[in-house]
């Protein structure tokens, strides 16, 4: 009988509960995680991306030293039809220094003394047989801090590469590309990458930013959005096939968040990043409809059509099947071969595919979603399909979405909510009553409105309820993940950065503490508030990690006074007294910033855990006690 009671108080929970959600919002990709330092490298910027932008945004025509000639943008003979624009430079008089182009990067080009940078460019000689070229990195005073030279040799497009070693650290350098003789050349894909990218990947990620995400130890990563997935019209719906292969052949497009998306950080790079972090990939494909099924003013390049035409849907469904083959298929398959050609013959072990994002649950959506869902489920029972239920908790589409998901037996649905911290404290019972026999939940986007410690503590309290309900809530991810200073469309975010600095918010530390202290079993009879069992300022959980044997307690106090918990570990075998305690605490209003990045930070110490003990937690705190498995 007592054995039975023990079993009832323990249950298996998702081992993948805490992940990350990467969306290219707030300059998270180009100018952010993607390590390319040249802005508008392929001259594809346009007023559609952002009012006032054009092919020469971020570029300057340089005619120093009495040279003269002409600079234009052309489209007649591009490197690839997917990348139509290129610059044409005509040198009539070379002058003392040559004439050419200067790029100011994304708010300047940050470089470090002694480090090496990979420069590359595509050039086609249009007039004359060759052109001597000079590439210089300049500091703010205009002094050269790194350079290389080369001579063009081809009338056809050819890629030239060189390594530049930088002699002086600069937050805001610029790159100059100069033609040094009379003639005419076409220029495209001007690129500069640090050699030091995350895991030294080619076409890789900014090392410090990628490491900050990897330090969260996410169990999965959802990408590429958010609203970015459906776009604001069929013209910029995210189509994964446009984002793989040689970067000069990818399709750049308007980013729904009001800027430009090169797709240099594309599906191969996302999957590779997941693998490098040990996170499962969770791609989200559009459900065949655009933003909120918009057929109106937001649409670009469209006809007022609300979604992909029904007669084109079979091809679109095949596109989703091809993604699965690309990720998991053998190298002998059509799409597996493309993965192998990109340098990854082994499969990526795709387990999850999301369909749609916060779509309105209209007939147009339902029809298209069902077409994709039914085929993927039938052909790939090994894949967990994740549907979408619109913004929760009060939205009409949330209710309709759940009704539809239940009718169609969608294995998991994606819930989103952004609320006040008080809401998270008051709604910890939300999932306690969810029907365990219906669709499972991916809490794909959530955050309380702010980055203060109080916000983070409210989220921590809520996360204990996600653990308690880890049998139904299988995945969760805070949103948004990244925000670049000066380019932030959405606040709050988890990680803030500029070109040289990153700071982690209190919310980041809460996510990290839960993620690095995850379990796969939940135990409900281990922790109890010492004084008042119904104290609403307290939240707590106990999980066990079956791989390490660790028993992990999370104690949250959202009040302004100390509180105590009783802990009873007597049911556990295979643990000793060795424990590590990590505490995140401080003033409720305190938050990190670029100026004071470490105001709120977890502090770790050793602890001796008896079988029974009372533990006093600090005001406004998250305490994680990890009792080590033997
Ligand atoms: O996370 C920011 C946005 O919020 C996402 O793009 C969208 O899914 C939600 O509305």
Image (tube, rainbow, N blue to C red):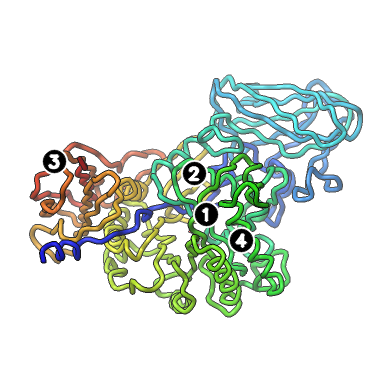
Q: CA distance from mark 4 to mark 2?
A: 21 Å
> In front of the other: label 4 or label 2?
4
Badges 1 and 4: C-beta atoms under 8 Å apart?
no
Q: Earlier in the sequence, mark 1 or mark 3?
A: 1
Give the secondary structure at mark 2: helix
Q: CA distance from mark 4 to mark 3?
A: 51 Å
Q: Earlier in the sequence, mark 3 or mark 2?
A: 2
Q: Residue at x 43, y 46 (%)?
A: 495
Density class for disc 4 (Cα within 10 Å; few <14, some 14-19, many ≥20) is some
- Look at the picture and state if 267 lies above or below 71: below
- Residue 448 lies, in percent from the top left, at 36, 59
Q: Earlier in the sequence, mark 4 or mark 2?
A: 2
Q: Residue at x 27, y 63 (%)?
A: 425
The quadrant of the picture occupied by the N terminus is bottom left
Residue 223's disc is 1
Q: Which residue is mark 3?
A: 577
Q: Which residue is mark 2?
A: 275
> In front of the other: label 1 or label 2?
2
Q: CA distance from mark 3 to mark 2?
A: 35 Å
Q: Which residue is mark 4?
A: 321
Q: 1 left or right of 350?
A: left
Residue 133 visible in image: yes
Give the secondary structure at mark 1: strand
> In front of the other: label 4 or label 3?
4
Give the secondary structure at mark 4: helix
Q: Earlier in the sequence, mark 1 or mark 4?
A: 1
Judging depth in this view, the residue of 254 and 336 nearest the camera is: 336
Judging depth in this view, the residue of 510 and 157 nearest the camera is: 157
């Amino acid at each position: 009988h007592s054995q039975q009671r023990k079993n009832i108080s323990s249950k298996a929970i998702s081992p993948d509960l805490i992940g990350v959600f990467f969306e290219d919002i707030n300059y998270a990709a180009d100018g952010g995680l993607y390590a390319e330092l040249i802005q508008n490298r392929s001259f594809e910027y346009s007023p559609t991306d952002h009012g006032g932008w054009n092919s020469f945004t971020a570029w300057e025509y340089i005619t120093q030293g009495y040279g003269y000639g002409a600079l234009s943008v052309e489209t007649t003979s591009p490197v690839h039809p997917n990348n139509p624009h290129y610059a044409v430079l005509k040198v009539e008089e070379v002058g003392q220094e040559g004439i050419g182009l200067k790029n100011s990067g994304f708010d300047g080009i940050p470089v470090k003394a002694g480090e090496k940078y990979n420069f590359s460019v595509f050039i086609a000689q249009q007039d004359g047989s060759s052109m001597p070229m000079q590439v210089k990195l300049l500091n703010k005073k205009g002094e050269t801090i790194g350079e290389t030279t080369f001579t063009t040799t081809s009338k056809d497009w050819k890629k030239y590469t060189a390594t530049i070693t930088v002699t002086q650290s600069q937050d805001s350098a610029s790159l100059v590309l100069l033609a040094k003789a009379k003639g005419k050349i076409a220029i495209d894909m001007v690129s500069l990458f640090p050699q030091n990218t995350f895991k030294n990947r080619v076409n890789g990620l900014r090392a410090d930013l990628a490491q900050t995400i990897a330090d969260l130890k996410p169990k999965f990563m959802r990408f590429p959005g958010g609203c970015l997935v459906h776009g604001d019209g069929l013209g910029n719906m995210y189509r994964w096939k446009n984002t793989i292969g040689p970067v000069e052949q990818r399709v750049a497009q308007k980013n729904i968040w009001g800027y430009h998306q090169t797709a240099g950080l594309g599906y191969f790079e996302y999957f590779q990043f997941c693998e490098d972090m040990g996170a499962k990939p969770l791609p989200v494909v559009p459900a065949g409809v655009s933003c909120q099924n918009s057929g109106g003013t937001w649409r670009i390049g469209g006809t007022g059509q609300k979604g992909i035409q029904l007669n084109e849907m079979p091809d679109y469904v095949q596109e989703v099947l091809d993604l699965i083959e690309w990720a998991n298929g053998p190298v002998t398959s059509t799409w597996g071969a493309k993965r192998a050609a990109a340098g990854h013959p082994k499969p990526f072990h795709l387990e999850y595919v999301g369909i749609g994002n916060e779509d309105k649950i209209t007939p147009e959506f339902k029809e298209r979603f069902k077409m994709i869902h039914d085929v993927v489920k039938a052909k790939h029972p090994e894949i967990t399909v994740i549907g979408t239920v619109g913004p929760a908790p009060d939205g009409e589409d949330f209710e309709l979405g759940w009704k539809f998901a239940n009718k169609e037996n969608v294995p998991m649905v994606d819930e989103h909510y952004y609320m006040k911290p008080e809401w998270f404290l008051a709604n910890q019972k939300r999932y306690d009553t969810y029907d365990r026999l219906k669709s499972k939940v991916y809490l794909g986007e959530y955050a309380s409105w702010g980055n203060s410690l109080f916000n983070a503590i409210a989220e921590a309290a809520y996360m204990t309820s996600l653990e308690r309900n880890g049998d139904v809530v299988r995945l969760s991810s805070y949103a948004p993940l990244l925000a670049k200073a000066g380019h932030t469309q959405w606040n709050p975010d988890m990680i803030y950065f500029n070109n040289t600095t990153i700071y982690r918010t209190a919310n980041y530390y809460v996510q990290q503490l839960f993620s690095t202290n995850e379990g796969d079993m939940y135990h409900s009879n281990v922790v109890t508030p010492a004084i008042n069992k119904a104290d609403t300022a307290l939240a707590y959980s106990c999980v066990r990690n079956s791989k390490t044997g660790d028993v992990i307690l999370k104690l949250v106090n959202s009040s302004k006074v100390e509180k105590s918990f009783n802990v009873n570990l007597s049911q556990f075998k295979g643990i000793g007294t060795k424990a590590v305690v990590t505490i995140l605490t401080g003033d409720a209003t305190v938050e990190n910033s670029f100026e004071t990045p470490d105001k709120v930070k977890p502090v770790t110490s050793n602890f001796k855990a008896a079988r029974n003990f009372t533990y006093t937690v600090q005001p406004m705190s998250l305490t994680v006690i990890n009792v080590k498995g033997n």
